[in-house]
Image: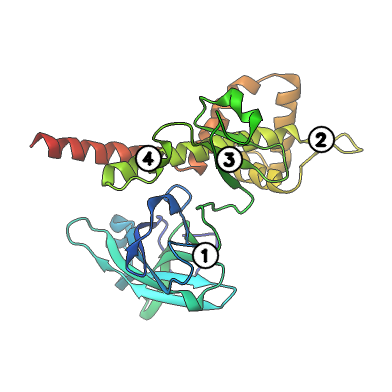
Amino acid sequence: MSRIIYPYAVLSGRAEVEITRVRVDSRPLEYARISPSLQTVALDDAGRDDWQEAVFDVRAVLPEEEIAYGPWSELACVAVLKESTTNTRTVQRLTKDRGSGAWQGSVRMRRSRHRSRATLGVQIVAAVEGVRGRMIGRSETDWVIDLQAETPVRDKEIRIVEADFRDGPYAWLRPLKDAPWFVDTSGDMPTVYLNQGIEGLTALLRGSSTVEKATAALVNAQIVSDVWETMFHAAVSEIELDENGRPRIPIGWRESVLETMLPDVLPGLSPADAIVELRARREEGYGWTELQSRIQYAAALRAQLPKQLATTLRLTARSSQGEDR
């Protein structure tokens, strides 16, 4: 379940949590403000400034096979919405759907009880060794509910700008007029420029049907994957040597990117050894080309691209079957 050691049996499998729908004062939140790949919801100015309540429809998939053979009873799955800045915590019990086996329910967020960023995840509790209410599992990654963001960006160090690359205010983007997006890592804050000149891109990211939403999630995951890959290369280029000739890790978001991706790019090496190996390969050229596939793989994992691709293919197949009937 985690690196914490519990004095009783816990689940080793992960619980996957998904927010399937968001309503703000009974009105659906536009899909562009919900990022499944980043597991983030942006609620700032969600249609109006004075909204009172947001409702999140939650779906959780648990490691059912492990649960079935475990030493526990009275199992329950609950959704937990919390924010540390206001010390607010809301717990909602989920119910198991007999058809799909997923646990589902709705969680209500009162605007007056929250200030900036909340998290929404699931916890699995059960009776273990005669003791009720013990937590035996939880979601691997909780969703972020950002009340101060108009765009769903999990990392606050990334900025999203929508602009027409052909005729917009950024002349330096005009040579890239056919690119759907561009990642700029030259400044202190990475910026993703989305090309409004690409017909249908904005509409796609705001799709309304099930298949359109899945396709939007896939495109968003591809964008995020490109962002991670570009940021990684930018971070590597900033690795310098200290006075003793040892590689020095850059600070800020570049340090965070390296720490996050290196375990997948160079598995089996400590962070310090990975930095040395990474710089050596880049400077001396050996193995650098072969390493590109590992970098792409690590970026795709961060963006949950394989998962989004599988979801889109599955929903598209179901939609096609429905049309053929």
Q: Within 10 Å of the Cα at label 1, are there few (<14), some (14-19), or many (20+) other Cα atoms?
A: some
Going 31% across and 71% down the picture, which residue do you hit?
75
Name the N-terminal-most of marks 2 and 3.
Answer: 3
Q: Nearer the viewer, mark 2 or mark 1?
A: 1
Name the N-terminal-most of marks 2 and 4.
Answer: 4
In the rendered structure, the answer to whether residue 252 lies left or right of residue 43 reads: right
Instruction: Name the quadrant containing residue 310.
Output: top left
Q: Which residue is mark 4?
A: 204
Q: Nearer the viewer, residue 315 or 162?
A: 162
Label 1, label 3: how many angstroms apart (C-alpha)?
21 Å
Give the residue type that dot 1 points to: Leu
- Rendered position, 227 above or below 80: above
Residue 240's tag is 2
Residue 192's tag is 3
Residue 147's tag is 1
Going 61% across and 38% down the picture, which residue do you hit?
268
Name the N-terminal-most of marks 1 and 4.
Answer: 1
